[in-house]
Image (cartoon, grey):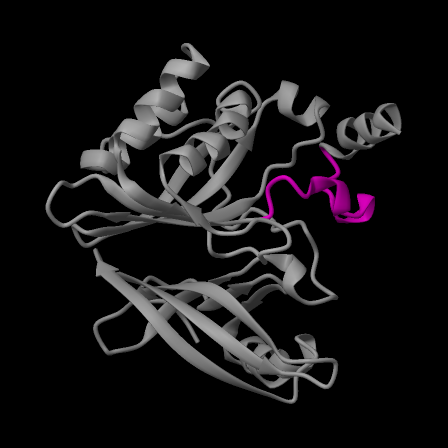
């Protein structure tokens, strides 16, 4: 019912936050119905445990009347000594099945909506975040990001192939980061909130911090998670798997937007139309 230090335990899912055992039980009972499924099977893929937290990448195979669907998810948990959980956070791309919002509200609610230092990160992951937020020449930043990945590095895996197919190789990495580096850090920055790093795999839960320029372009601050897998021998990044809804802001309903930024985003949409 409660965390070690008094706050109520919770599960934060795309449907919302469920605090306390009764609400968590409600989420569990409605889980299949929310996903339009009659049954489901969970297939584990990877697990990263570090610093009192755990992250599991899984594929949930839903059996649905409309047709079966397999959804990759990342599930993170705050562990406690008695084999219990203080909190669970479930991430998956909203567009796999109907009924989910493209807006993943901010989970960690930072006091200061600005980038955080990267002092708790190490190696290629730290270098990646430094390059991502470097305001310098975009082409050089992209070259430097490519340089810290292996030749067969893969990108993607959480979105459907018809939205963003997973691909690999330096050309693919370069193509993805042309768009990303054009927006970061001028339109947004990625604020690391929780880091789960076992030396080979680093899972970063983050908040997208959007600038005034970003809001004027239709961006929306929200939460996501990314998994960075290092090569065992070289330490370079061999896989980058980002799970978020960034880039799909046009599909967020106006009433789902935070009141403080709703006028900016709505004005952008009217101008774009």
Q: Is residue 94 left or right of residue 84?
A: right
Q: Is residue 208 left or right of residue 265?
A: left
Q: Tell me: residue 160, above or below residue 256.
A: below
Q: Is residue 116 left or right of residue 273?
A: left
Q: Nearer the viewer, residue 158 or 82?
A: 158
Residue in view at x 41 percent, y 33 percent:
171
Q: Tell me: residue 198, above or below residue 57.
A: above
Residue in view at x 51 percent, y 30 percent:
180
Q: Nearer the viewer, residue 90 or 73?
A: 73
Find residue 9 and report its image quarter: bottom left
Main secondary structure along the magenta-highlighted residues: loop
Residue most extreme to the bottom: 38
Based on the picture, tell me whether residue 252 belongs to the magenta stretch: yes
Find residue 129 and report its image quarter: top left
The C terminus appears in which quarter of the rendering? Answer: top right
* Residue 141 location (% of width, % of height): 37, 19
Find residue 218 and report its image quarter: top right
Residue in view at x 50 percent, y 26 percent:
178
The N terminus appears in which quarter of the rendering? Answer: bottom left
* Residue 198 location (% of width, % of height): 18, 54
Q: Nearer the viewer, residue 65 or 55?
A: 65
* Residue 239 location (% of width, % of height): 33, 48
Magenta segment range? 245-260
* Residue 8 location (% of width, % of height): 46, 67
Q: Is residue 224 left or right of residue 45?
A: right
Based on the picture, tell me whether residue 188 belongs to the magenta stretch: no
Is residue 199 visible to the viewer in this orientation of the structure?
Answer: yes
């Amino acid at each position: 019912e409660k965390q070690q230090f008094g706050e109520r335990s919770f599960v934060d899912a795309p449907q919302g936050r469920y605090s306390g055992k009764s609400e968590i039980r409600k989420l569990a009972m409605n889980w299949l119905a929310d996903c339009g499924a009659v049954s489901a099977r969970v297939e584990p893929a990877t697990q990263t445990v570090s610093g009192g937290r755990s992250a599991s990448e899984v594929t949930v195979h839903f059996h649905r009347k409309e047709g079966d669907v397999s959804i990759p998810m990342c599930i993170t948990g705050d562990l406690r000594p008695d084999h219990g959980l203080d909190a669970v956070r479930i991430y998956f791309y909203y567009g796999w099945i109907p009924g989910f919002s493209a807006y993943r509200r901010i989970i960690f609610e930072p006091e200061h909506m600005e980038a955080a230092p990267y002092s708790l990160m190490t190696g290629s992951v730290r270098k990646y975040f430094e390059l991502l937020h470097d305001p310098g020449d975009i082409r050089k930043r992209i070259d430097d990001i490519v340089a810290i990945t292996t030749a067969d590095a893969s990108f993607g895996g959480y979105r459907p192939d018809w939205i963003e197919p997973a691909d690999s190789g330096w050309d693919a990495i370069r193509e993805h980061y042309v768009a990303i580096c054009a927006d970061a850090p001028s339109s947004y920055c990625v604020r690391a909130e929780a880091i789960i790093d076992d030396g080979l795999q680093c899972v970063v839960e983050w908040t997208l911090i959007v600038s005034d320029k970003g809001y004027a372009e239709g961006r929306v601050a929200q939460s996501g998670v990314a998994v960075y897998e290092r090569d065992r021998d070289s330490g370079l990044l061999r896989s980058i798997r980002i799970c978020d809804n960034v880039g799909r802001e046009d599909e967020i309903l106006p009433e789902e937007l935070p009141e403080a930024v709703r006028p900016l985003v709505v004005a952008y949409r009217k101008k774009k139309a």
